[in-house]
Amino acid sequence: MPLFDFRCRQCGREFEALVRTGQPAICSCGCSDLEQLPSGFAVSSSASRKANLDAVRQKGAKARKEKLQADHGYMEKHIRDEH
C-alpha cells in the first residue's frame, strides 16, 4: 500500500494516507476532494547523520544551559528569601 501526501481542498489540512487500490483517501473533515502532493523522500549519508547529530547535541547543550540558569535563579531567590 503506497503512502501519499494530500491537501484537502475544503479545509486545507495536509496529511499522509495509506491508499488501497479502489479506495479513495478521505480527509478527517469527511471531504474526498483532495489534491495529491509530491511526496518527500529521505536521504541518509554520513554527512547528513553527522549534521543531525551535531544539531541534536547543540539543542541538548542549550537546554542544559537554560536549566542550569533557571536552577541558579531559583537558588538565588531561595537564599534571598531565607535571609
Image (cartoon, grey):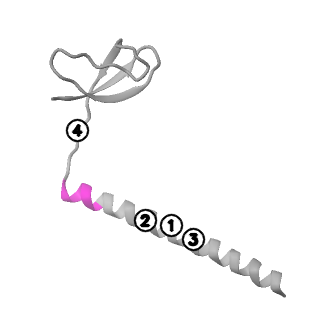
Say which residue label 2 marks.
Answer: 58
Give yes or no for residue 48 being in the magenta stretch.
yes
Give yes or no for residue 55 being in the magenta stretch.
no
Name the amino acid type tagged 2. Answer: Gln
Decide if residue 81 is on the left or right side of residue 6: right
Instruction: Kindly identify the residue that appears in the image at 40 percent across and 23 percent down.
Output: 28
Pointer 1 with pointer 2, Cβ within 8 A: yes
| Marks 2 and 3, how far apart at CA | 14 Å
Instruction: Kindly identify the residue that appears in the image at 32 percent across and 23 percent down.
Output: 6
Task: Give above or below for 49 relative to 8.
Answer: below
**Which mark sits nearer the N-terminus, 2 or 4?**
4
Q: Quadrant of residue 17?
A: top left
Task: Give above or below for 68 relative to 5.
Answer: below
Say which residue label 1 marks.
Answer: 62
Q: Quadrant of residue 3?
A: top left
Name the amino acid type tagged 3. Answer: Lys
Q: Which mark is residue 67?
A: 3
Disc 2 crowd rating (10 Å Cα; few below 14, some 14-19, many 20+) is few
Task: Give above or below for 45 relative to 76.
Answer: above
